[in-house]
Image: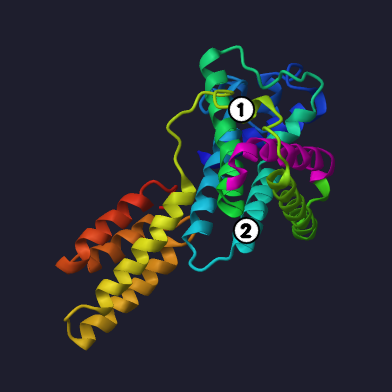
Amino acid sequence: MESKKNDILQAAIRLFSRKGYSSTSVEEIAKESGMAKASFYKYFQGKEELPLEMCIILENNIEQDIRALYSKPNLSKHDKLHGFIVLYLKNLVENKVYLMMDLPEPSMLIFQNEQLNYAFENHEYKLYKWVRDCLIDIFGPSIEDHAWDMTFVLKSIVFEYIRFFADRMNDETIEHLTQFIIFLSSSLATSLNNADSAPHLFWSKQGWLPESALSNPFDQGRQINSLLHSLEDSILLSSWSSEEKQECQQIYAHLKEEALKSNPQKGLLKALFAYLEQYKELQKVCRLLKNLLDHAPISE
């Protein structure tokens, strides 16, 4: 089913880019994706759901990649910023939803359906807020008043670059753009810290979009890293036999490797946790770690 949904999404991108959103019919999308019109409605209720579905996929992929990045121990601030920008750019380029911003009708993503419109705005808000949270984490709380200003400047540059050069984006060009964004964000942070001025843009003030209960992949990543350290310490400091310790350390190594992936395998994690939870001393930290990993999109 997921393969068919993806076929529809990719067909829609091609048609929206060529003809525009309003001029493209469901029938044309179905034909482009190699299915009958009636089959389209097995996967989507209507054309409006397509851009929203693409944004949901983009959001989930970015969130799990942030969580995996922040789960890694001993990353420098530069490595965090570099890793964050690369994962963000790669997901934007692969997802392609923002290529549809270059269509003749600028309001194509403002849905007639109020619920869809609200859902889209909230997904969009998450993507912006994660950039802001990353900037504050890297450059410190002193830039918090200007963090929204920086976010919109940087994302505007990224979106325009991708709109015009998406077909030429590869690992090399993504790295070049990443280095430019690092330079620009560092320059903005330094300049705004030294400037005695209030935030410049209206979205710097709270309330430009309603705050909602957002998941925070940055904190989740840090907590996963901390709990993995606690789990390892519990094994090393236990009074078990050397054979038991060695076996648990091997299981822990496999667990750590899997937990730090963007898409950990659910079945493998379940088996590894089941083994470690035989030991009463490990049950609490295993439970906490499982709860955190349950928030991540997980592969079967």
Q: Position of residue 103 (x, y in %)?
A: 79, 25
Residue 71 visible somewhere in the drawing = yes
Q: Is residue 155 shown in magenta?
A: yes
Which residue is under mark 2? 83
Q: Earlier in the sequence, mark 2 or mark 1?
A: 1
Residue 39 visible somewhere in the drawing = no
Q: Picture quarter containing residue 197?
A: top right
Badge 2 element: helix
Tell me the kind of residue under disc 2. Answer: Gly
Q: Residue furthest bottom?
A: 242
Magenta span dominant secondary structure: helix
Q: Is residue 25 left or right of residue 235?
A: right
Front residue of 51/65: it is 65
* 48 w.r.t. 146: above or below: above
Part of the protein shown in magenta? 142-166
Q: Is residue 22 left or right of residue 140?
A: right
Q: Position of residue 295 (x, y in %)?
A: 39, 46
For image coordinates 22% across by 87% down, the residue present is 242
Tell me the kind of residue under disc 1. Answer: Leu
For image coordinates 61% across by 48% down, the residue present is 135
Residue 210 - label:
none
* 233 w.r.t. 139: above or below: below
Front residue of 250/178: it is 178
Q: Picture quarter containing residue 128?
A: top right
Residue 50 - label:
1
Front residue of 100/206: it is 206
| Disc 1 crowd, CA 10 A, few/some/many (<14, 14-19, 20+) | some
What distance separates the C-alpha of mark 2 from that of mark 1? 29 Å
Badge 1 element: helix
* 71 w.r.t. 91: above or below: below
| Disc 2 crowd, CA 10 A, few/some/many (<14, 14-19, 20+) | some
Q: Position of residue 252 (x, y in %)?
A: 33, 72
